């Protein structure tokens, strides 16, 4: 069910490694819990984060969720389409609804993340 | 499903935005059985309610409903409520779920010799059908002439063959009915309404849409716009308070507070920049905290972030520019007149 080329966090983000950058978004499970996304706050390109930092927020009509990065690095691209089309986070969370691309400073954090099967198990535990 | 004052309630069925828009354009069906009801009956029932609540029950005609409140002796809100007057000897108070137990205890604790003051919340299920098509849908299922029930009026009759009180009230800013039915009949009435209404665009709607709809209509919610710290004057609910009708609980304090200038007032705001302010976020002006957001959301009708909140009186003027501290980020906002939404008539 979840793309196998991604790794997953306990806070329901996914990351997909593309050479020296990784793409980050929130999972289908997360968007489903949030409901209709109406506003996405993304960081500025060039901003540098540590692993575990909050990089933005996603707001639905009824709730707000913080987005964290599991890897340290610099934001090299943000998904500008989300300004006009925040609902793409709902419609295609693992594709068009991606949030940012990060040029990561170390790949060691990826090893600690869940693979698709482990994440699916994790969501079934009701987290 | 979420827990709401001990009730399991759906936040949404298909999605808050679609449900909200269905209510504005056609109709939505809400299960609001969590609302509490207190029955006051017997000779002198009206006088009892008159002393218990600030609106003028004597001026309310039988078959009519008005907004009122339970106030503390300090003139702040215990709850807001609807008073339904069948006759001077028979009244029904409709209160919020989260306060129902407190409200009943408060009412029952006031002297009421020879009167029945009963918590009848378990006796009624409450189904709200709201929207421009609501009356046409209900009309398919009842012999009652709905034209005789004006806004804030009620009548007893049948809906889908089941006994019901048809109350032309709601919490969405739209025309519609709240139908009191027996709990055993609620499922059948719900299904009959959905069947009859689906071709006209009726959809089930949850707590999420109920909140965005009432906020656009600037209807206060207990625990947000009003609570034990707020007075009707601050909340802009002066019209509910009838100081001339005689004594009632909270009157002395309200007479005194009326004579003092207000320190803060409830306002509507809309966010000018990007972001959504929520309950508890602070208004800032000139680097200084000047108030607090009581309800904030994304408005499906206007497609922008808006809400209500308290600000210092001098700033409570439409057009005033403010900022709201949204998790450490200052987003620009503007004071606007209430309500945001008024239905076309």
Image (cartoon, rainbow, N blue to C red):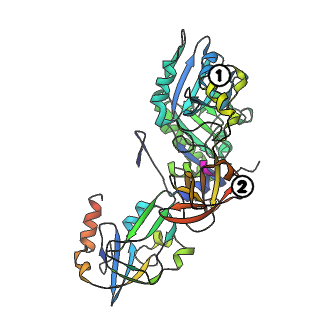
Question: Does residue B221 lie above or below A118 as drawn?
Answer: above
Horizontal and vertical percent position of residue B202: 59, 50
In this rendering, which labeled residue sits more in front, label 2 or label 1? 2
**Structural crowding at the residue carrying mark 1, measured as other residues with C-alpha within 10 Å and reported as few (<14), some (14–19) or many (≥20):** some
Q: Residue at x 56, y 46 (%)?
A: B29
- Chief secondary structure of the magenta portion: helix
Horizontal and vertical percent position of residue A26: 39, 71
- Disc 1 sits on a residue from what chain? B
Question: Does residue B21 lie above or below B54 as drawn?
Answer: below
Name the residue that disc number 2 marks. B318
Location of the N terminus of chain A by quadrant is bottom left
Q: Residue at x 56, y 60 (%)?
A: B324
Q: Residue at x 50, y 28 (%)?
A: B103
Labels 2 and 1 within one chain: yes
Whether residue B216 appears in magenta in the rendering, the answer is yes
- Which stretch appears magenta? B213-217
Name the residue that disc number 1 marks. B86
**Res A87 seen here:** yes
Element under disc 2: loop
The Cα–Cα distance between marks 2 and 1, rounded to whole angstroms, is 40 Å
Which is nearer the eye, B89 or B187? B89
Q: Residue at x 66, y 19 (%)?
A: B87
**Res B60 seen here:** no
Location of the C terminus of chain A by quadrant is bottom left
Query: Residue placed farthest to the top in the image?
Result: B114
Element under disc 1: strand
Sequence order check, earlier mark of 2 and 1: 1
- Disc 2 sits on a residue from what chain? B
Horizontal and vertical percent position of residue A84: 57, 74
| Snapshot quadrant of residue B232 | top right
């Amino acid at each position: 069910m979840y793309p196998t080329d991604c790794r997953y966090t306990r806070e329901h983000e996914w990351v997909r490694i593309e050479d020296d950058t990784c793409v980050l978004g929130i999972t289908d499970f997360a968007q489903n819990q949030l409901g209709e996304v109406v506003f996405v706050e993304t960081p500025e390109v060039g901003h540098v984060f540590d692993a575990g930092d909050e990089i933005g927020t996603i707001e639905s009509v009824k709730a707000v969720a913080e987005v964290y990065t599991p890897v340290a690095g610099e934001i090299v691209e943000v998904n500008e389409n989300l300004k006009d089309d925040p609902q793409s986070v709902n419609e295609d969370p693992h594709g068009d609804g991606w949030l940012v691309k990060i040029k990561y400073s170390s790949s060691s954090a990826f090893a600690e993340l869940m693979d698709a099967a482990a994440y699916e198990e994790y969501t079934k535990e009701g987290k | 499903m979420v827990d709401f004052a001990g009730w399991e309630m759906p936040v949404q069925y298909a999605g808050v935005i679609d449900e909200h828009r269905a209510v504005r354009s056609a109709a939505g069906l809400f299960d609001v059985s969590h609302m509490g009801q207190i029955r006051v009956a017997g000779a002198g029932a009206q006088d009892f309610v008159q002393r218990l609540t600030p609106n003028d029950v004597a001026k309310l005609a039988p078959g009519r409903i008005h907004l009122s409140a339970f106030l503390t002796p300090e003139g702040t809100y215990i709850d807001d409520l609807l008073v339904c007057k069948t006759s001077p000897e028979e009244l029904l108070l409709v209160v919020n779920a989260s306060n129902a137990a407190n409200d009943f205890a408060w009412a029952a604790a006031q002297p009421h010799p020879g009167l029945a003051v009963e918590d009848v919340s378990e006796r009624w299920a409450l189904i709200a059908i709201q929207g421009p098509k609501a009356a046409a849908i209900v009309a398919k299922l009842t012999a009652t002439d709905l034209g005789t029930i004006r806004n804030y009026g009620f009548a007893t009759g049948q809906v889908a063959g089941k006994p019901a009180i048809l109350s032309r009230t709601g919490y969405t800013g739209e025309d519609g009915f709240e139908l009191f039915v027996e709990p055993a009949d609620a499922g059948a009435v719900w299904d009959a309404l959905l069947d009859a209404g689906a071709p006209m665009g009726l959809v089930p709607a949850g707590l999420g849409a109920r909140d965005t709809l009432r906020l656009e209509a600037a209807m206060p919610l207990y625990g947000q716009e009003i609570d034990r710290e707020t007075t009707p004057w601050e909340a802009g609910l002066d019209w509910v308070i009838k100081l001339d009708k005689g004594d009632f609980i909270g009157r002395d304090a309200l007479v005194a507070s009326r004579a003092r200038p207000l320190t803060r007032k409830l306002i509507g705001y809309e966010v000018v920049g990007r972001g959504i302010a929520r309950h508890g976020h602070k208004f800032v002006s000139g680097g200084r905290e000047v108030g607090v957001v009581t309800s904030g959301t994304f408005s499906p009708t206007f497609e922008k972030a808006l809400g209500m909140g308290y600000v210092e009186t001098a700033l409570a003027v439409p057009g005033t520019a403010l900022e709201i501290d949204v998790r450490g980020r200052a987003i620009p906002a503007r004071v606007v007149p209430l309500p945001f939404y008024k239905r076309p008539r």
